Image: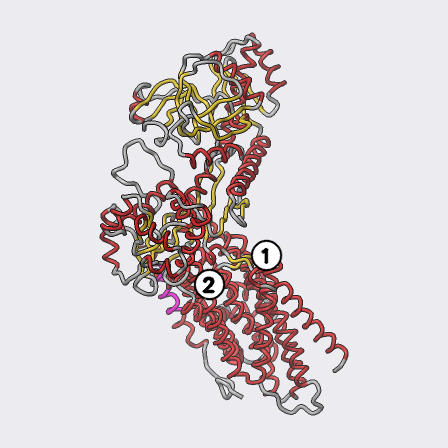
Amino acid sequence: MDKSLTWKVGLIVAVIALSVFLLYPPKDKINLGLDLKGGMHLIMEVVTDEALAIQTDMSATQLRGLLKDASIAYDKVARKGFSRIEVTGTKLDDERRIKDILDDDFRDWTYTVGGSLISLALRPNVEQQLREQSVDQALETIRNRVDEFGVAEPTIQKEGLAGDRILIELPGIDNPERVKGLIKSTAMLEFHLVVGGPFQTEEAALAEYKGQLPDDLEIVRTNPRRLDKGFYVLKAATVVPGKDLKSARRAQDEYGAPAVGFSFNSQGAAQFERFTAANIGKPLSIVLDERIESVATIQDVIGADGIIKGRFSQDEVDDLVLVLRSGALPAPLKYIEERTIGPSLGADSIRKGLMACLGGLLLVVLFMLVYYRAAGINSVLALLLNMLILMGIMAYFHATLSMPGIAGIILSIGMAVDANVLIFERIREELAAGKSPKSAIDAGFKKAFWTIFDANLTTVISAVFLFQFGTGPIKGFAVTLIIGIVASMFTAIFVSRVIFELTYGRQKKLTRISI
Amino acid sequence: MLKIFKEEPTFRFIRWRFLAFALSGLIVLAGIFVYATRGFNWGIDFSGGTLIEVGFDRSVAIPQLRGPLSAIGLGDAQITRIGGEDKFFIKTLAALKRQDRPAGEKLEDIEEYEIVAREIRLALMDENERAQAAAGRIDLNNSAAGEIARFLRDKGLNDEDAQDTAGRIIGLRKGGTGIIRDLAALEQAGVKHRIVELLREQAFFSKFTFLSVEFVGPQVGKDLRRKAMLACIWALIGMLIYIGFRFKPLYGLSGILTLAHDVLVALSFILFFRIEMSLQVVAALLTIVGYSINDTIVVFDRLRDNLKVMRKDNLEAILDKSLNQTLSRSIFTSLTVFLTVLSLYLFGGEVIRPFAFTMLVGVIAGSYSTIYQSCAWLKVWERWLVKRKKS
């Protein structure tokens, strides 16, 4: 055996060894997709507009305070849209002082002052930053909750072009309803003053205001599990923002029924104290996830600690404590997609995927052997190696194998032998043209190379576009296809050549080859 | 040596180009007609909606499902049989607004969907099962492990027993049809006798199970259609540039006309056979774009060589010659992929079948179009091609 051949064989053996090493043991190394092992796949959109609106509301409240402290007269400070604030009814004389306040404390805002109207808008870069923050924060919060609930190997990541979607994959999930509830709860515990209610329907509530609800009020429905079904009219501004909530715990009410206890941080406590002192005797509502959990009259000044009473079961208290502890979501989430794959379907899909793979492999192998004889064996060896490398690379990248991924593997079986067919047909042509077997093999490989390269490159080009476009499983398909094609370039051109050299290289006078 | 053609064949392909153009045109026109009249059978990826795969323990006819679904106002749900007679897809739109909902109650899409799934489950139960469910018993064929374990804990079992039993029940469902028929099966699977007796009181087995439940919100679809179309167009442009660069611009143009043809023909057949238009079908279309160009490149390569050698012949003869020389190669490379895709179609199961179908059509169309699009178009542009060659 000449030196270069030894070197080539060595390389092939090394590649085989590496692939086996990467792949072994396959059970641990190949990640099965949810469609194969069962589980729950969720895509949620963070309603970042809402996060902005909350931030803007807080700034509006701050502005009111500042104007009041400086005894500047105004009619109304209101949020417009989700990132603008309008102040109406200011006096011309105060313009200088208002501008000073805005310049000092509202640097994230641009403003225009026109007579008695001042409008503020959040700077676009700040707005963008807030949006991104809210998604990151949501991601973190969801991760905490899922971890705390104890789901094994969850996938939680950002998705989508706008980057405002979150993909959550929970394999073999036990209790879908409860987990969904946990993830989705904004845990935005808000306190709103009650203006009117309860009403039977939203229309009845609206009728109180002649169908035109003032800007600073909102109609919220009750959570029917805690209160009688109905609607209340609430002040839109929240008293203490959810982020000032410090902790939550299991508690009991005076009758020993399960309840949720909570504490504010010092800032929140101070704010809540000031607020309750000013509103004794008025009804206050506790709103969670945009539903009223409880309505009670403020009896006394409340500081850092409070409890939420209601018709809670112990499980409900536990879940609520968990979500409150893991921190509030900065904005509500909207479900975009949900797929739940049962355990038996996954097992069935694996069986069918394997069947299709074996079927495809068998058909191709049979065809190659019957048509190309000994050279067929060559291509089959190359094909098997191709499969091994493909799986090895997938294991290395921790790629997830899903049903479309299996389809990708099956396709690569068919496409990998394409290269062999191109080479063999070319060799046959060269033989027919009267060349000696050795030079025919040489010419066959040389002349087919660029054709194979072109053909594979075009497939890779469209697979790349597919990857760009696709979501999870489709991306998996594109990736398998690309890896399969790259591996086939190596096996069909390099490995197959070496096998030819090994079989025919030592024969001094080669007159016939089986192809 | 086994060969399909003993000698190099001498088919005069190009002569029949107008017939071929007419055939392709006819298929695409018919496709457009179906599109205009009936449209695509959009999958939930694109249309939004709920898709439930349900398996029964016996053969069921579609009307038997249609009845209960109509009773809950889902008469227009699409029911498709999968493989045998015991598995079905039930597809409904997401924006399902029930009439009996109290006024003023606004639900999010997802809640809407959860209600739909729950109601379909109840609707498919028979009287007896529904009564059991109403009595607070647990349906062991339609409950997740955690739900079963929690139920058992509530009934006074310790945590370990509850987990163990739930695990065994799910284990049983994983094998076979996914449906447990009776308690005897549980005992065989090693559930303690005491617990089986408890379950006799507290649980029941409905005669079906939801194998998968999928929901896609309506806002996703619109975005996706546009993106799918853009991805296809960009892939085509990618091919145009690549071939134009490797050969000549006119070759590139023939190339993408060929690919557009393949994609349109595949789409037409998807329309004819009401194949569900889903993400995986788009994946298949894009794969076709990348794959079906292969034969074309092989022929163009050969054509370039022949153009240098056969200076005296006219273009039609050179095209025919090139096609004949590469014919067995073209047939075989397509055949290997065809065989694997066929295997996928036959054995891969219902989930992947639309993908396999699209690929099958695409591979055949791709082989055909190498001859009757790529090369035929070159003939159409002979005037410009040949002039170029002379200058």
Q: Residue at image x 39%, y 27%?
A: A310
Name the chain letter of the residue that bears numbered label 1. Answer: A
Three-letter amino acid code at the position of disc 1: His
Q: Is residue A465 above or below residue B135?
A: below
Residue A256 vs B293, above or below: the answer is above
Q: Earlier in the sequence, mark 1 or mark 2?
A: 2
Q: Quadrant of the C terminus of chain B?
A: bottom right
Question: Which of the numbered marks, if any, corresponds to residue A398?
Answer: 1
- Residue A158 placement (x, y as % from top left): 54, 44
Magenta segment, which residues? B21-33
User: Does A291 appear above or below B276?
Assistant: above
Asked whether the residues under marks 1 and 2 belong to the same chain, the reply is yes
What main secondary structure does the magenta stretch of the protein show? helix
Picture coordinates of residue A283, whole percent (x, y): 40, 17
Tell me where residue B244 sits by quadrant: bottom right
* Position above or below: B261 against A433: above
Q: Measured from the top left, where is residue A294 in percent x and y?
A: 40, 25
Label 1 Cα crowd, 10 Å radius (few <14 / some 14-19 / many 20+): few
Task: Please indicate whether residue A101 sits to the left or right of residue A216 in the image.
Answer: right
Report the side of A223 relative to A50 (left or right).
left
In the rendered structure, the answer to whether residue B307 lies left or right of residue A343 reads right
Q: Residue at x 46, y 23 (%)?
A: A191
Q: Residues within 10 Å of mark 2 (few under 14, many from 20)?
A: many
Instruction: Indicate which disc residue A350 carries.
Output: 2
- Mark 2 and mark 1 in contact (Cβ < 8 Å)? no
- Subunit that carries the residue with mark 2: A
